[in-house]
Image: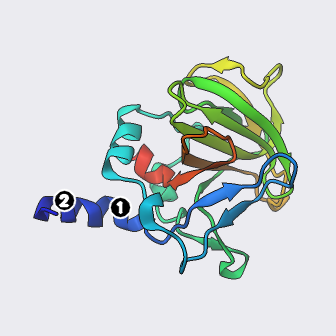
């Protein structure tokens, strides 16, 4: 590995090293993100510089107007439930019923209700390489349906507190994951949204 590659790895990839792969359980079980054990986890789930570069090239739209990208820094590596699981996402606080916008063109792959995430959306990008996960919604946008084509900036839902979000802290829980070859909406390698949004 060249000196430049080492610098890039430390600056871009290192913040993701604490994160484990996650798999949301399939549809027949309550959806929940699960962390692979640190001891047994392969580090192939760490996003490459090219993965981050590809997401930046797409110029993703921040899903909530007025959100501060710098406030997202470090949230991905936070833990939940006393360290039992990783956050692997960013939380974007906003008043209840604030519109949530699609971060890029794509398809609504799954509309799902889960205990932790509440009312959720899984969006696939046009190439079906990435999934964008929106959780704790108050409600979906009127008429939103699975397999519906959407455009970057379309309103797809509204900020809320469904699932395990505190009732007095409405926010959007937003995650990005790189899909596996099977292209299953509940399975992939997490990518820090802050790295994708920073230019």
Left or right side of 169 for 14 = left
Vertical side of 105 occupied by 185: above or below? below
Residue at coordinates 60% horizontally, 40% vertically from top-left?
182
Residue at coordinates 55% horizontally, 33% vertically from top-left?
103
- Return the mark for residue 13: 1
Left or right side of 49 for 44 = right
Report if residue 199 is visible in the image: no
Residue at coordinates 79% horizontally, 59% vertically from top-left?
165
Quadrant of the image containing the N terminus: bottom left
- Dot 2 lies on which element? helix
Quadrant of the image containing the C terminus: top left
Where, by quadrant of the figure, is residue 37 drawn?
Answer: bottom right
Vertical side of 121 occupied by 92: above or below? below
Instruction: Identify the residue position indicated by label 2 in the image.
Output: 5
Between the C-alphas of marks 2 and 1, the distance is: 11 Å
Q: Are marks 2 and 1 in contact (CB under 8 Å)?
A: no
Mark 1 burial class by Cα count in 10 Å: few <14, some 14-19, many 20+: some
Left or right side of 120 for 195 = left
- Dot 1 lies on which element? helix
- Return the mark for residue 181: none
Left or right side of 97 for 42 = left
Q: Earlier in the sequence, mark 2 or mark 1?
A: 2
Where, by quadrant of the figure, is residue 148 drawn?
Answer: top right
Residue at coordinates 60% horizontally, 32% vertically from top-left?
124
Residue 140, percent from left and from top? 81, 32
């Amino acid at each position: 590995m060249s000196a430049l590659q080492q610098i890039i790895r430390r600056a871009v990839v290192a913040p993701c090293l604490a994160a484990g792969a996650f798999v949301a359980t399939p549809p027949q079980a309550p959806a929940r993100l699960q962390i692979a054990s640190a001891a047994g986890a392969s580090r192939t789930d760490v996003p490459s510089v090219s993965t981050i570069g590809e997401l930046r090239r797409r110029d993703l739209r921040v899903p909530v107007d007025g959100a501060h990208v710098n406030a997202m820094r470090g949230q991905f590596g936070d833990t939940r439930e006393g360290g039992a699981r990783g956050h692997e996402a960013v939380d974007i606080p906003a008043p209840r019923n604030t519109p949530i916008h699609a971060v890029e063109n794509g398809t609504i792959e799954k509309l799902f209700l889960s205990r932790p995430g509440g009312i959720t959306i899984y969006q696939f990008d046009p190439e079906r390489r990435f999934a964008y996960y929106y959780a704790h919604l108050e409600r979906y946008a009127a008429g939103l349906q699975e397999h519906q084509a959407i455009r970057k900036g379309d309103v797809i839902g509204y900020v809320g507190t469904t699932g395990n979000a505190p009732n007095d802290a409405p926010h959007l829980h937003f995650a990005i994951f790189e899909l596996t070859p099977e292209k299953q909406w509940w399975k992939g390698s997490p990518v820090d949204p802050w790295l994708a949004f920073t230019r």
